[in-house]
Image (cartoon, rainbow, N blue to C red):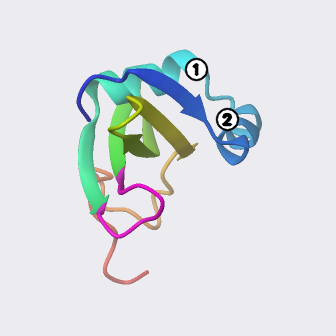
Amino acid sequence: MSAIGLLVFRIHAIKRMFQRRISKEDVQEVLETGETIETYPDDKPYPSRLLLGWRHMRPLHLVAAENAESGETIVITVYEPDREEWEQDFKKRRADT
Protein backbone atom coordinates (compact mmCIF):
# COMPACT_ATOMS: atom_id res chain seq x y z
CA MET A 1 0.00 0.00 0.00
CA SER A 2 1.06 3.56 -0.42
CA ALA A 3 0.73 6.10 2.37
CA ILE A 4 -1.73 4.91 4.97
CA GLY A 5 -3.82 8.07 5.14
CA LEU A 6 -6.94 7.93 7.27
CA LEU A 7 -7.24 4.49 8.84
CA VAL A 8 -10.78 3.05 8.96
CA PHE A 9 -11.55 -0.23 10.73
CA ARG A 10 -14.52 -2.36 9.74
CA ILE A 11 -16.46 -3.75 12.71
CA HIS A 12 -15.37 -7.26 11.69
CA ALA A 13 -11.71 -6.20 11.88
CA ILE A 14 -12.15 -4.69 15.35
CA LYS A 15 -13.83 -7.86 16.65
CA ARG A 16 -11.11 -10.07 15.21
CA MET A 17 -8.33 -7.84 16.51
CA PHE A 18 -9.77 -8.09 20.01
CA GLN A 19 -10.19 -11.88 19.78
CA ARG A 20 -6.70 -12.38 18.36
CA ARG A 21 -4.89 -9.84 20.55
CA ILE A 22 -3.80 -7.72 17.60
CA SER A 23 -3.35 -4.05 18.34
CA LYS A 24 -3.86 -0.95 16.21
CA GLU A 25 -0.07 -0.53 16.34
CA ASP A 26 0.32 -4.06 14.92
CA VAL A 27 -2.00 -3.13 12.05
CA GLN A 28 -0.15 0.12 11.36
CA GLU A 29 3.19 -1.72 11.29
CA VAL A 30 1.88 -4.26 8.76
CA LEU A 31 0.47 -1.46 6.59
CA GLU A 32 3.75 0.47 6.73
CA THR A 33 6.21 -2.39 6.26
CA GLY A 34 4.23 -5.37 4.99
CA GLU A 35 4.34 -6.99 1.58
CA THR A 36 1.33 -7.42 -0.70
CA ILE A 37 1.01 -11.14 -1.39
CA GLU A 38 -2.41 -11.25 -3.11
CA THR A 39 -4.57 -8.67 -4.83
CA TYR A 40 -8.33 -8.66 -5.25
CA PRO A 41 -8.99 -6.05 -7.97
CA ASP A 42 -12.66 -7.00 -8.36
CA ASP A 43 -13.61 -6.51 -4.69
CA LYS A 44 -16.36 -3.97 -4.10
CA PRO A 45 -16.72 -1.18 -3.25
CA TYR A 46 -12.89 -0.88 -3.50
CA PRO A 47 -10.17 -3.21 -4.72
CA SER A 48 -8.36 -4.83 -1.81
CA ARG A 49 -5.18 -6.75 -1.09
CA LEU A 50 -3.72 -9.21 1.36
CA LEU A 51 -0.55 -8.12 3.09
CA LEU A 52 1.96 -10.13 5.07
CA GLY A 53 3.79 -8.34 7.83
CA TRP A 54 5.69 -9.22 10.97
CA ARG A 55 5.23 -7.79 14.43
CA HIS A 56 7.50 -8.99 17.25
CA MET A 57 8.34 -12.19 15.31
CA ARG A 58 4.60 -12.87 14.77
CA PRO A 59 3.39 -13.20 11.17
CA LEU A 60 0.20 -11.29 10.42
CA HIS A 61 -2.05 -11.22 7.39
CA LEU A 62 -4.10 -8.10 6.82
CA VAL A 63 -6.79 -7.50 4.21
CA ALA A 64 -7.19 -3.83 3.37
CA ALA A 65 -8.84 -1.71 0.72
CA GLU A 66 -7.85 1.77 -0.31
CA ASN A 67 -10.36 4.47 -1.17
CA ALA A 68 -8.20 6.74 -3.30
CA GLU A 69 -10.85 9.47 -3.46
CA SER A 70 -11.06 9.96 0.31
CA GLY A 71 -7.52 8.87 1.16
CA GLU A 72 -8.87 6.12 3.45
CA THR A 73 -7.21 2.78 4.10
CA ILE A 74 -9.96 0.40 5.17
CA VAL A 75 -8.92 -2.53 7.35
CA ILE A 76 -11.25 -5.43 6.58
CA THR A 77 -9.66 -8.16 8.71
CA VAL A 78 -6.37 -9.19 10.28
CA TYR A 79 -5.21 -12.58 11.51
CA GLU A 80 -2.23 -14.81 12.19
CA PRO A 81 -1.94 -17.17 9.21
CA ASP A 82 -2.50 -20.88 9.88
CA ARG A 83 0.70 -22.87 9.29
CA GLU A 84 -1.37 -25.73 7.86
CA GLU A 85 -2.93 -23.50 5.19
CA TRP A 86 0.13 -21.46 4.17
CA GLU A 87 3.62 -22.28 2.96
CA GLN A 88 6.41 -21.82 5.48
CA ASP A 89 7.02 -18.19 4.42
CA PHE A 90 3.25 -17.39 4.75
CA LYS A 91 3.26 -15.88 1.26
CA LYS A 92 1.52 -18.67 -0.68
CA ARG A 93 -1.37 -20.95 0.14
CA ARG A 94 -0.48 -24.64 0.34
CA ALA A 95 -1.58 -26.55 -2.73
CA ASP A 96 -3.12 -29.34 -0.65
CA THR A 97 -5.61 -27.08 1.22
Residue 79 visible in the snapshot? no
Residue 87 is left or right of residue 27, and the answer is left
Residue 41 is left or right of residue 43, and the answer is left
| Residue 95 figure quarter | bottom left
Q: Quadrant of the C terminus?
A: bottom left
Q: Position of residue 49 (x, y in %)?
A: 34, 52
Secondary structure state at the residue bearing disc 2: helix
Instruction: Please determine whether, in this image, residue 56 is positioned above or below residue 85.
Output: above
- Mark 2 is on which residue type? Met
Instruction: Please determine whether, in this image, residue 97 is positioned above or below residue 42.
Output: below
Q: Which residue is mark 1?
A: 24
The residue shown at (35%, 24%) is: 4
Q: Which residue is mark 2?
A: 17
The residue shown at (47%, 21%) is: 6
| Residue 16 figure quarter | top right
Q: Position of residue 34 (x, y in %)?
A: 29, 33
